[in-house]
Amino acid sequence: MSDGLAVAAVTATLRNLLEAGLGTGTVTVSARALDKARDGGGGPQVNLFLYHTQLDGAWRNQDLPGKLKPGETGSPPLPLALFYLLTAYDDDKDEVKSQQLLGRAMRILHDHPLLGAAEIQSSFPTSDLHQQIERVRITQEPMPVDEISKLWTAFQTPYRTSVAYQVSAVLIESLRSAKTPLPVLRRGEDDRGVTSAPDLIPPFPTLTELVLPTHQASALLGNTVILRGHHLDQGTLTVRFTNPHLTDPVPFTVDSASATEVSITLGGPNASERWVAGFYTVALVLQDGDHERTTNELPLTLAPEVTAPTTVARGPAPDQKAQITLTCSPEVRPAQRASLLWGDLETPARPHPTQTDTLVFEILHAPVGTRFFRLRIDGVDSFLIDLGADPPAFDPTKRLEITP
């Protein structure tokens, strides 16, 4: 594993490798940007420029071998592939000497495909790159002439014959701590290990279906709800109803329970006060000694039941306001949204700062006529269709007339 100095260590090692092969004092080996390469003066020179870095795909999501033990998790290292551009210079204007120098430099890198640990450590002692388990490889990188030309153009420098190399992989260690859980002492109860089942049904309690009476879309207080699933008899049964407006468990009655079906009656003492209309999630909690298991959750909507006057008189001009008072069950909490749907008109309820079973609606410029109505609380509508009729029909008791 290497630290954040690994990139500089690779460049320093490559430079020392070229200096040793080309002859110290005879040829200058530099590591400068393309537009600064000849700032040091003339004479024979080889320049090594790091022009690009990218992630090494082979090590992108791998942990280093030996770094973590089974069951431990850590952050993978930052794996880099470094791309260098090798360029040769000389004062000879016909480029023969610079080409000879370029060929010698290419032969040195060709004959030295791997960077040794001793070479890295002597070139850049402050880096830990020499301790990396993965060897650092040098590979010539095919690069079209037009791409190299664009690179020189970006530095506003005249193009020179250059060769590209890829050096990889450089693995920079993450500073995030690994998670090392304690060893496992026992593989479950009685150290029995994993239990295999001969079928596709999982061996833990699961709900698969929620059934409402007469194919209703929502439940009403007093309805019997059937929860179906499997392994529902593994301990003492508790039903959990969850709604954002409730902090205390709501009352209910379990009529019957078996391994595949649980029947529940919605209600209980003071049901209208303790329940709210809206969206719920339902789950079963099974307590078997010290072991508690909770099933998955299924959605349930509880609709309000509403009574309203059959006729409301519209007020005088200019407002021509019709005030409608409804009584509903369960009671409505202050944070709940309530609106009246009369025909195709939707009117929000007047503010109700306390929990109440009475809601007041005011329709300005109310049209005269008779229309069906619904009460919508938190997105759940009261029943308008009589599903017991054949065919289903609108409930005639849910009609409201506004008179002049």
Image (cartoon, rainbow, N blue to C red):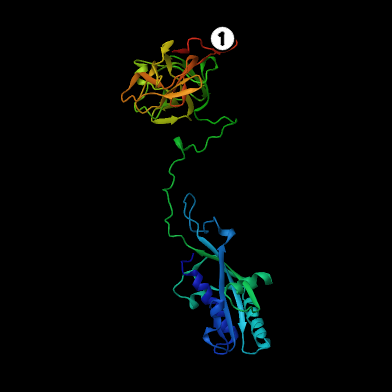
- Up/down of 264 relative to 3, above or below: above
**Of the pair 353 and 341, the residue shown nearer to us:** 341
- Up/down of 181 relative to 43, above or below: above
* Quadrant of the snapshot with the C terminus: top left
**Of the pair 79 and 145, the residue shown nearer to us:** 145
**Of the pair 109 and 91, the residue shown nearer to us:** 91
In the rendered image, which quarter is residue 145 located in?
Answer: bottom right
Is any atom of residue 119 visible in this view?
no
Mark 1: amino acid: Ala
Side (left or right) of 246 relative to 54: left
Residue at 37% of width from left, 19% of height from top?
Answer: 359
**Of the pair 87 and 187, the residue shown nearer to us:** 87
Is any atom of residue 311 visible in this view?
yes
Q: How many numbered discs sit on the rendered protein?
A: 1
- Up/down of 302 relative to 46, above or below: above
The residue labelled by disc 1 is 389
Query: As drawn, which residue projects farthest toward the left?
Result: 354
Q: Secondary structure at mark 1?
A: loop
Side (left or right) of 55 relative to 283: right
The picture places residue 183, in percent across and down from the top left corner, at 43, 47
In the rendered image, which quarter is residue 157 located in?
Answer: bottom right
Residue at 54% of width from left, 56% of height from top?
Answer: 62
Residue at 50% of width from left, 19% of height from top?
Answer: 343
The picture places residue 144, in percent across and down from the top left corner, at 68, 70
Decide: few, some or many residues near mark 1? Use Cα within 10 Å; few <14, some 14-19, many ≥20.
few
The picture places residue 311, in percent across and down from the top left corner, at 43, 10
The picture places residue 58, in percent across and down from the top left corner, at 59, 59
In the rendered image, which quarter is residue 81 located in?
Answer: bottom right
